Amino acid sequence: MLYLIGLGLADEADITVKGLEVVKRAERVYLEAYTSILHVGKDKLESFYGRPIIIADREMVESSSDEILQDADKVDVAFLVVGDPFGATTHTDLVLRAQELSIPTKSIPNASILNAIGATGLQLYNFGQTVSIVFFTDTWKPASFYDRIRENASIGLHTLLLLDIKVKEQSLENMARGRKIYEPPRYMTVAQCAQQLLEIEQDKQEGVCSADSLAIGCARVGADDQTFACGTLEELSESDLGPPLHSVVLVGKRAHELEKDYLKGFAINQDTFEASWKKYHTRP
Amino acid sequence: MLYLIGLGLADEADITVKGLEVVKRAERVYLEAYTSILHVGKDKLESFYGRPIIIADREMVESSSDEILQDADKVDVAFLVVGDPFGATTHTDLVLRAQELSIPTKSIPNASILNAIGATGLQLYNFGQTVSIVFFTDTWKPASFYDRIRENASIGLHTLLLLDIKVKEQSLENMARGRKIYEPPRYMTVAQCAQQLLEIEQDKQEGVCSADSLAIGCARVGADDQTFACGTLEELSESDLGPPLHSVVLVGKRAHELEKDYLKGFAINQDTFEASWKKYHTRP
């Protein structure tokens, strides 16, 4: 059996009791390590599980999945995913491949940023589609996310922005020369995301996200030092919420007074918070 | 400290290791028992936790929350919620009330239907706002959900429908006479939901959900006997997916071929599935 097991968001103790039982008895244990990260390293997980872990990078999962699936018709293989197993697309690929090979699969769900974001006090019912924000480069500023945000905003919904993670990236030079040397990992911050949003807004001028729009900077959601900061995009573009992972919520116009009461507790500046709320979020 | 602890979706072993540690040492343990249910009873949880559980109904949580919060500035109180603690609005109320009383709070996230629904193979990025469907009565057929579905559909997104749960409801007669006699619990089925959608569509005639629209009937998501059935609303209106909880996903027009490949495995009828896909989901 192939088990896809969600690890939750913060550390080794966020696995479910059910998931832990499978890990302890599985023949091989893989950790998917490119779409998200825990706040603890492989060593910590190995000592908690009492089992060795094989790190599965994108190349292995997308191109060498048969290596992961080897003998999984006879033995149990655990494939660990930070958050929930179905947060990232490529894992449905892995399940489809297992089905082709007549390998039974089972998934053990866990918290994902998509529901843990409810800890901001915003109602999960009021979120539209989730949007990914990738790092801009000097030559590449993909802006399709702007249209997605506009779609949500047009019906008054909140938007959760998931911020780019770059792990095991090669520099152009190393790639050209075929050198398997990787850059240090990079995790987009709330400030970088806010800056990119304001940059795109300045290009497009369609008023989808203004300097005084309210957003919530979220850091290490689900961990003991989980941090939320609610402020304007301008304020957040100068914020420092500490170590990764970060994400951002753009607050929709249809927001409710109860949501406001909760957000107030995270406001960077009560005056700008009230002003922006009054401007954008007061129902007619 | 007040701990809000997610229990996940199916049984006693879906709690996280971190959550279980808190339950085992908490002074009092409450189980919120009106917005969702596990597939195991209170007895099973009590024997697994080695702790007595106090059932918290809606009245207690909404009107007598100070009873739950009593002494929580000095001792640890665990408030258990099926799924994730912030799936339902009233729990942000509880946290706000704790803050007023200077009681520190902490939440321990877990899987919610909002992310576990990814097991259908549909990409979580492609979902719009989540919508609740309540039981129609002879005299009351609230239809605001129809507008919410239309909003999602207009931008091509999937819609997760959460189906009504009636627990501890009184008949009008018992309520009038002040008798605390409660009706047996009722859980809306996929078939009932599909029937209500078709009924509203017939009233409104706006083409938001047609008899041949594709949807996924979902039963017991996250449990060992989790079941998905993908078919037209007409097919689903005659389906029987077994015991609760059920939910439904309306498939959005922007659906991807990879999502189709996965859904095909759950199709009730390959011919109607292909026909509906071709009619509604083929990108130009």
Image: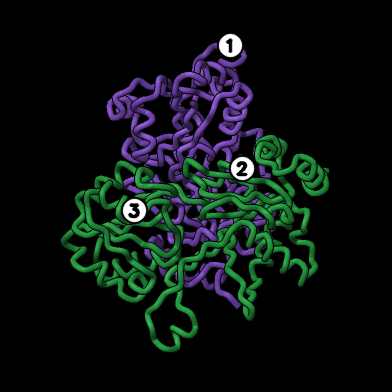
Chain colours: A purple, B green
Which residue has dot 2 on it? B123
Look at the image and tell me in which quarter the C terminus of chain B lies: top right
Name the kind of residue labelled 3 in the image. Answer: Ile
Q: Nearer the viewer, residue A227 or B253?
A: B253
Viewer-proximal residue among B96 and A275: B96
Q: CA distance from mark 3 to mark 2?
A: 27 Å
Whole-percent x, y for residue A90 in the image: 59, 31
Query: Disc number at residue B5?
Result: 3
Find numbered disc 2 in the image and state the secondary structure of the residue it sits on: loop
User: According to the image, label 1 marks what residue?
Assistant: A178
Q: Secondary structure at mark 1?
A: loop
- Report x, y in % for residue A54: 42, 20
Given the image, on which type of amino acid does mark 1 rest?
A: Gly
User: How many angstroms separate mark 1 from mark 3 (CA)?
Assistant: 49 Å
- For image coordinates 44% across by 23% down, the residue present is A76
Chain letter of mark 3 equals B
Q: Dot 2: within a 10 Å radius of its alpha carbon, few (fewer than 14), some, or many (20 or more) residues? A: many
